[in-house]
């Protein structure tokens, strides 16, 4: 193990009775096919406060890989794994970063599911509280913070004209390789990871029923339950995504609760 390197493992396949809440399937993403999900945003939501939650299993190392992002006219937001396997969140507008954070934990396990929650609340007086990233229920330390976003800053997320992309931020590269399940976005809410997961049996972080989540204008809940329409939204908002270069074979039974 490299000095100062942190290794994490997520949920693995345990008997189904261990889980009170089941995730039935996941979606497979691969950069060779330039596969990703996208949705146009026509109504501006809450640009200051939102939460993104996803169960993820990456399958490739040594590449920049976008989890969630947006891009338009050179302006971009990206939550991604970097080519050195840390996780980064940044927003770039014009010619500078509005915020650019790198988190301490290295994600090099390509065999296990992990849960990531990115929590944003730009109304917080402390800059440290405005963006938070959690891995399997634990908040990660941000070790690089090139610029601190200002109080009440409006992000590019939830902004009309800026699409939401999953597995790609919207320019020409940084496609994700791996699987995602139970992808949730709450517009206008800053949720702790306990809204979506819980510890059980020896501190194993597992999914829990996210019912009670308030989704807001652009919120969504992607279960990937329809192979012919992977981007169907189950939140009740009908904020469906378009599946780009993703056929029915991109729905798979591998999930955080069932395994492959």
Image (cartoon, helix red, strand yellow):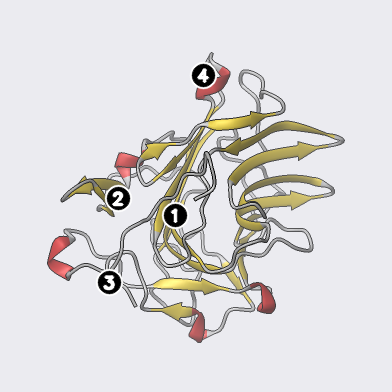
Q: Residue at x 67, y 39 (%)?
A: 90
Q: Quadrant of the C terminus?
A: bottom left
Spatial distance from mark 4 to mark 3, Cα to Cα? Answer: 38 Å
Residue 56 falls in image quadrant: bottom left
Local crowd size for mark 3, using a 10 Å CA cut-off: few (<14), some (14–19), many (≥20): some
Cβ atoms under marks 4 and 2 closer than 8 Å: no
Instruction: Pick whichever of labels 4 and 3 is earlier in the sequence.
Output: 4
Judge by depth and name the residue closer to the eye, 165 or 6: 6
How far from the left and from the top, in percent, is residue 25? 36, 73
The label on residue 258 is 3
Which residue is the extreme one toward the left?
Answer: 17
How far from the left and from the top, in percent, is residue 116? 45, 48
Local crowd size for mark 4, using a 10 Å CA cut-off: few (<14), some (14–19), many (≥20): some
Cβ atoms under marks 1 and 3 closer than 8 Å: no
Judge depth for marks 4 and 3 and give the one in front. 3
Residue 100 falls in image quadrant: top right
- Secondary structure beneath label 3: loop
Residue at label 4? 124
Spatial distance from mark 2 to mark 3, Cα to Cα? Answer: 18 Å
Local crowd size for mark 2, using a 10 Å CA cut-off: few (<14), some (14–19), many (≥20): some
Q: Residue at x 32, y 47 (%)?
A: 196
Spatial distance from mark 2 to mark 1, Cα to Cα? Answer: 12 Å
- Secondary structure beneath label 1: strand
Spatial distance from mark 1 to mark 3, Cα to Cα? Answer: 16 Å
Residue at label 2? 210
- Secondary structure beneath label 2: loop
Judge depth for marks 2 and 1 and give the one in front. 1
Q: Residue at x 42, y 79 (%)?
A: 252
């Amino acid at each position: 193990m490299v000095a100062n390197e942190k290794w994490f493992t997520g949920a693995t396949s345990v008997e189904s009775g261990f889980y009170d809440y089941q995730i039935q399937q996941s979606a497979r993403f691969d950069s060779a096919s330039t596969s990703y999900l996208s949705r146009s945003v026509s109504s501006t939501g809450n640009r200051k406060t939102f939460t993104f939650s996803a169960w993820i299993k990456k399958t490739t190392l040594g590449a920049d890989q976008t989890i969630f992002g947006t891009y338009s006219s050179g302006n971009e937001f990206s939550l991604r794994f970097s080519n050195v396997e840390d996780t980064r969140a940044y927003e770039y507008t014009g010619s500078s970063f509005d915020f650019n954070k790198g988190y301490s934990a290295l994600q090099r396990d390509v065999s296990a599911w992990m849960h990531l929650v990115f929590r944003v609340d730009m109304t917080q007086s402390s800059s440290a509280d405005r963006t938070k990233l959690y891995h399997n229920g634990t908040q990660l330390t941000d070790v690089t913070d090139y610029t601190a976003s200002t109080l009440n800053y409006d992000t590019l997320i939830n902004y009309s004209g800026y699409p939401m992309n999953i597995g790609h931020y919207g320019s020409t590269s940084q496609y994700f390789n791996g699987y995602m399940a139970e992808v949730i976005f709450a517009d206008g809410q800053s949720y702790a990871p306990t809204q979506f997961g819980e510890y059980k049996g020896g501190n194993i972080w597992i999914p829990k029923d996210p019912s009670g989540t308030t989704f807001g204008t652009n919120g969504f809940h992607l279960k990937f339950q329809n192979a012919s329409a992977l981007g169907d939204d189950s939140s009740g908002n009908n904020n469906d995504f378009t599946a780009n270069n993703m056929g029915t074979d991109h729905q798979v039974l591998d999930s955080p609760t069932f395994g492959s």
